[in-house]
Image (cartoon, helix red, strand yellow):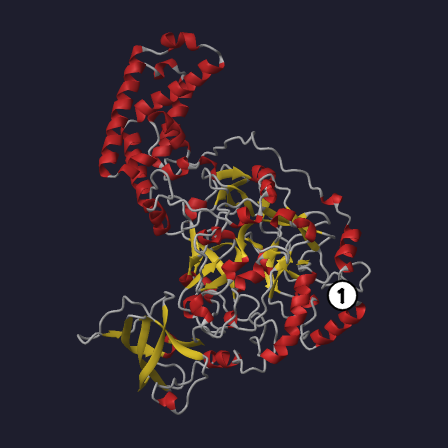
Amino acid sequence: GTLDAIDSSRRGSLCKRIQNMIFSRYLFLALFIPASTLGSPEADLFHRHNQSAYLALRSSSVSSQNEAQNRQRRRRKFTRNKSYNEAKNRLPDDPRGCTLYGAPSSIPDSGLGMYTTVSPSNDEAIGLPEIGISLIDPSIGRALLANYPWSGEQLVGNTLEAKKTEGLIPSLGMLANSHLGLKSCKIDLGKGGSSIFKGFGGGQSRMHWGPIPWEVDEPGRGASSEYYNVYFQVTDAKKLKIPDGMSNGATEIFVDYGEEWFAWRERNGAFSGMIPFEKHFIRADAMIKRFVEENEYLILANILENERDQQRLEKSLQQKENQLLSPMKKDDLKLLNNKYQLLLDESTKEDPKIAYVLPPVDQIHNLIDVGLSTARYSVPNSLQSTSWLDAHGFCMDNMRMGRSTIPQAGMGAFAVRSMPEGSIVATTPVVTLYQDLLKVAKESKNRDVNDLQLLINYCFGHPNTTLLMFPYSSTIHFINHGATNTNDQAGNDSTSTNAMLRWSHSEYHASELLEKSLQEMQELQKTGLMIDIVATRNISIGEEILIDYGNDWVEKWDEHLVHWEECSNDNVPSPSALMRLNNDQSSILRTRSEQNSMPYPSHVQTVCYFSKHHDYDDSEGILRWQFTTTTEMYPCSILARESFRNDQSQLDKSDTHLYMVHVIIDDSTDAYVVNVPRYGIFFAEKAYQSNQLLKCGFRRFISLADDMVPESWKKQ
């Protein structure tokens, strides 16, 4: 009876709408929630700063000309870098415009998130290659920073560096949120088969930045992270697909934190309410699809009535409701409600979390609009337009990582788009922490290692405060220091600064935090501060982005150059020995007994790729090695070696060797493994022997300008 009141074309259209939804795998219709309550970002106020006066002011505090000349002489032996022109134009312009945004997350009360305008395929990389920063024996307790580290296994080989390790991965590893029903990517532990461990292995890059490894006499050794090629890999491209009818759209990127991350917080009361897992969304989708198929007519009637309700509201005809709603329609709605209640009862009995993700019966039409995906229904704003992102977000891919043009700087950040003076190169939120958190733990102090975590080199700070700020947007950590003085009158010298820091003009920058005391900032349990990196002159495509790290940083670096000459002669092991050992894959490895008379370098150890799930070879508990693509690796000692003729070889049929090894998994677990091939064994530094822990490695934060540090933050 309800359908008869609608003309045939309208009825056919509505029927087709539901049929398409039922018989196709996914039907995405763009659903936007207007953000009319959000104001447009504040206009760029860079014109308030006079560029010439700013650079002159920053340069005026530099030491005298004679001291500058002395610094130059000290630096001269460390400036063996190729011309910057070699790298200047390696990065092509990106005709697509911005493809990676930071903007408010669609998950309520979750702060900022990340969005992409690209629909990648499974196993493709998403986002940009990022840096990974190792935390060695961390002791950050309940500080705000404690919410962000990944387990040490996520930086390939990091677990070998110390007894306990964790890793910070900016951008997708810190800014992106996680939704267990829409998680679409995870850290790629084997990106492109690139090398690790100074030239051997498969996974993230942990090679040195140059054509040769850091040598003993290079003062940049140990001053920057060697985990600089960390990618995230798409695991479910369907969840990142932008609807076909959405020509200028973007979707929020949800990273896989792991279910235990949520389960632990749920057990400890960190979340209010239930946290449904992926299996709950999958089961709810199946149940609601079955329900829709069985009740197509009733759902269609409900959709029509909802549309009529809206029309009556708009036309102020609510007083005629009883006339417009036939008795038969009332029965239809009652029947639909009863059937849906049975579904809710069934799902609650099976698992309350399934019922939790199911929508109310009067919202089924909205669920249809998002392809019957209960996960997508829970965050409808996860699909956005680029115009909304341009208005309410910030671009995160204006820069790409590349080899720096600055000697001893490692990697650098290079412009992929032309950026005029005054434009924003990058915007980044920051995590606040205090300097004492970055002191090494007691168990590390008992060893000959650096007193400070490497993380401090990537933080913003100031000599007059103990507060530090770690930025976690994309590619920020590859931006190097540039000189504030240049002989180039145009100011376009390759080593001169072309960008500066300021407090962000973003509407999401919590400027009220600048009024809080130092104690309040140290106890802060939420983020909110944001920093803009602004072009101080026109920047060309392929040009390296450089900022002024501050006079305090420059003075500390010059002191480091003086002391480094003493340190480099203080029996510091050379990493090139490790490189040579791993590059020589044809060598026969020495057994433990052979190493008594012919030892390997004292700072290296043999490490085996090994999975704890290998099959037992016999009843005595000996394992038979199997090829694995995992990144499980453990220190091992070589007990025996067996040679045999490889008749299948297409080379010279030379002898091939298999090894028996003793693998040390942890303090209480070990394993004896046979049939280990040469490619299953490699060399790495012993614990607490890597460059990252070098006792005389450079440590200093990047100094903020004086006018960026509130008086309330300064030490009394």
Which residue is depicted at the point 46% across and 78% down? 582
Which residue is depicted at the point 46% across and 15% down? 313
Q: Is residue 528 above or below residue 570?
A: above
Q: Nearer the viewer, residue 600 or 296?
A: 600
User: Tag 1: residue type?
Assistant: Ser
State the residue position of label 1: 63
**Can residue 327 be seen in the rendering of this structure?**
yes
Q: Is residue 275 above or below residue 8?
A: below
Q: Nearer the viewer, residue 168 or 439?
A: 439
Q: Is residue 529 above or below residue 690?
A: above
- Residue 631, by quadrant, is bottom left
**Can residue 131 be seen in the rendering of this structure?**
no
Left or right position of 674 against 33: left
Q: Nearer the viewer, residue 169 or 539?
A: 169
Q: Position of residue 236 (x, y in %)?
A: 40, 49
Q: Position of residue 267 (x, y in %)?
A: 32, 46
Left or right position of 172 against 268: right
Quadrant of image for the N terminus: top left
Q: Position of residue 148 (x, y in %)?
A: 46, 53
Q: Position of residue 6 (x, y in %)?
A: 39, 16
Q: Is residue 123 above or below residue 673?
A: above
Q: Residue furthest left?
A: 619
Left or right position of 679 against 92: left
